[in-house]
């Protein structure tokens, strides 16, 4: 099959950027979108031109590195998959496909389709962890956790941190990401000691990074390659409210300012 | 962590303020509609009700100030959120598809803005009483007391096509605003969960449709003449029987 690509090209963070068109011919419909770009880049390199810079790593939908807005949808037309799991059979022969980087002030474009998503790392550093005892393994099942709770935490833990939620949101809000990362820990007993500070600090880091606010339209959930439910956002709101109230009334040790 | 900082300065806090003020306003508009539906009863009912509200004195002012604070906070937070959201993506996409966001959710700021313009006009019309001439604010006798004839004021209002059309547009947009807002406020407060989000969505639509129909019924009843002026001072407008009933009473 054959498609025409309209790809965003931008030399570096400060360059203007523009769309450029490329023909991709002799494609196998069972190629992934990234393999198709490989073919195009092979040819560009052969012609002595700069290949299209595109982020990718695992190519099996688990690392969250790949990130492209394909025909106006993060990760392309199919639901519940990443860009690397999008196949050319999802397009028609002769299609014109527009490929853009994820866009948000908090995700500056580094080159072509690659954005800098370190704002997510900052949010994780602010509270996306637990304090665990190191050393030898604990006995398995020493800590009983209900199956439903474990499953729900697992749903949230499916987040690969790709940023499709931010890319899809009209307000560039990172609420689905933050709610999944905080939610997976807040649901489990291991997450309880730091629950309040986690929620307060992660939301503060999110605001600080310049993401927008959630307007409850759930585009994030619809775009999420892991189909994470907006229910976690509701939970984050609830946990945040409780944490704010509790932290303003609770007794604090003298060492804490 | 200061609670005021959490409410006014963080993204989630601002949404909580939107939701709580939204809830107060929803409660108010539904109560207001139920009060207004008394137009279908004999005029004394709604005049009595209006007189009761007027006679609350200090309490009335407390309610008014409470509502004013709610509206001001609601709009303040709306403006602040919209500005931040704009700033969060300065360069947009060439093409972006809408995946599941409802029309109502995408037009909250516009529906809200027009509703706000209507509220200002509405307050000038019936609370300040400055949009129309003196003839539009008649008095009547109720239990030996001279009170505003709110029944006639409403009918006179809706007998003007422009007022009625603006009213219908504002009510339609407020219903649209509520069709998203009603479920959105539960989400903002962390009360919307998978187990009942479907029901909540249906509830929001049902309430919005009923709210629109209830208000539209009043306008249509006046415009079609089903509900007319029954104040004897407006002889030209009164159906004969009402005239006689009114005269007999005097
Ligand atoms: C006066 C002008 C108004 C403006 C400019 C306005 C604007 C807005 C905006 C921008 C939102 C946020 C939408 C979102 O985050 O998705 C909102 C939410 C809401 N509005 Fe209004 N609105 C107005 C009046 C009203 C009135 C009169 C009511 C009630 C009858 C109301 C009820 C709500 C509710 C319930 C919400 C949902 C709160 C939430 O998302 O948590 N609004 N409004
Ligand atoms: S490359 Fe790892 S998820 Fe796509």
Image (cartoon, rainbow, N blue to C red):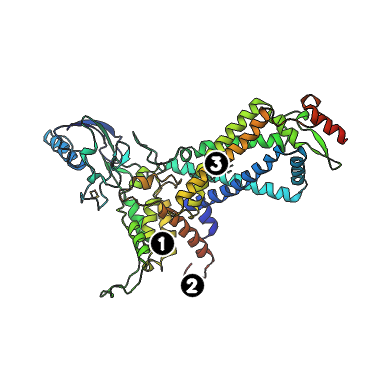
Residue B125 falls left or right of residue A145: right
Which residue does the numbered mark 1 point to in the structure image? A198
Q: Secondary structure at mark 3?
A: helix
* Cβ atoms at labels 2 and 3 below 8 Å apart: no
Residue at (77%, 26%) from the top-left corner? Answer: B237
Rendered location of residue A30, percent (x, y): 17, 41
Q: Nearer the viewer, residue B132 or A153?
A: A153
Q: What numbered label is drawn on residue A7?
A: none
Mark nearer the viewer, 2 or 1: 1
Q: Secondary structure at mark 1?
A: helix
- Which chain does tag 3 point to? B
Residue B91 falls left or right of residue B44: left
Q: Secondary structure at mark 2?
A: loop
Q: Does residue B68 sit above or below A21 in this rendering?
A: below
Gap between marks 2 and 3 measured at Cα = 50 Å
Which residue does the numbered mark 2 point to in the structure image? A253
Residue at (34%, 72%) from the top-left corner? Answer: A143
Crowd band around label 3 with a 10 angstrom C-alpha radius: few (<14), some (14–19), many (20+): many
Residue A56 falls left or right of residue B191: left
- Which chain does tag 1 point to? A
Residue at (60%, 44%) from the top-left corner? Answer: B71
């Amino acid at each position: 099959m054959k498609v025409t690509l309209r790809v965003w090209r931008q030399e570096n963070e400060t360059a203007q950027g523009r769309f450029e068109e490329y023909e991709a011919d002799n494609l196998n419909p069972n190629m992934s979108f990234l393999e198709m770009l490989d073919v195009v880049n092979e040819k560009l390199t052969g012609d002595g031109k700069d290949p299209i810079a595109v982020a990718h790593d695992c190519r099996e939908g688990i690392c969250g590195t790949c990130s492209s807005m394909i025909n106006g949808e993060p990760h392309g037309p199919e639901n519940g998959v990443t860009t690397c799991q999008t196949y050319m059979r999802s397009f028609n022969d002769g299609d014109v496909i527009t490929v853009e980087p994820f866009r948000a002030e908090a995700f500056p474009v580094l080159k072509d389709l690659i954005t800098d998503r370190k704002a997510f790392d900052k949010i994780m550093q602010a509270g996306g962890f637990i304090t665990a005892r190191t050393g030898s393994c604990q006995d398995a099942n020493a800590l009983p956790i209900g199956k439903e709770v474990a499953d729900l935490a697992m749903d949230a833990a499916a987040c690969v941190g790709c940023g499709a939620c931010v890319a899809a949101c009209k307000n560039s809000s990172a609420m689905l990401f933050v709610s999944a990362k905080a939610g997976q820990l807040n649901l489990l007993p291991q997450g309880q000691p730091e629950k309040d500070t986690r929620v307060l600090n992660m939301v503060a880091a999110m605001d600080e990074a310049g993401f927008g606010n959630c307007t409850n339209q759930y585009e994030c959930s619809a775009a999420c390659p892991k189909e994470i439910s907006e229910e976690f956002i509701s939970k984050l709101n609830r946990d945040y409210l409780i944490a704010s109230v509790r932290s303003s009334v609770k007794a604090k040790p003298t060492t804490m300012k | 962590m200061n609670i005021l900082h959490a409410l006014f300065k963080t993204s989630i806090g601002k949404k909580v303020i939107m939701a709580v003020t939204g809830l107060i306003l929803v409660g108010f508009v539904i109560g207001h509609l139920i009060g207004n539906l008394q137009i279908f009863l004999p005029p004394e009912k709604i005049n009595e009700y209006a007189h009761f509200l007027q006679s609350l004195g200090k309490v009335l002012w407390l309610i008014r100030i409470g509502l004013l604070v709610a509206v001001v906070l609601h709009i303040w937070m709306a403006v602040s959120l919209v500005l931040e959201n704009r700033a969060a993506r300065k360069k947009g996409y060439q093409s972006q598809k809408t995946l599941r966001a409802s029309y109502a959710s995408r037009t909250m700021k516009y529906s809200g803005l027009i509703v706000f313009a209507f509220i200002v006009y509405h307050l000038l019309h019936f609370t300040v009483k400055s949009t129309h001439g003196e003839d539009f604010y008649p008095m009547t006798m109720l239990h030996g007391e001279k009170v505003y004839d709110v029944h006639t004021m409403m009918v006179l209002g809706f007998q003007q096509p422009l007022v009625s059309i603006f009213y219908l547009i504002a009510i339609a947009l407020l219903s649209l605003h509520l069709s998203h807002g009603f479920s959105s406020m539960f989400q903002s407060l962390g009360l919307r969960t998978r187990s009942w989000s479907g029901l909540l969505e249906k509830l929001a639509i049902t309430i919005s449709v009923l709210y629109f129909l209830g208000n539209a019924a009043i306008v249509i009843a006046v415009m079609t003449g089903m509900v007319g002026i029954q104040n004897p001072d407006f002889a030209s407008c009164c159906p004969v029987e009402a005239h006689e009933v009114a005269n007999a009473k005097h």
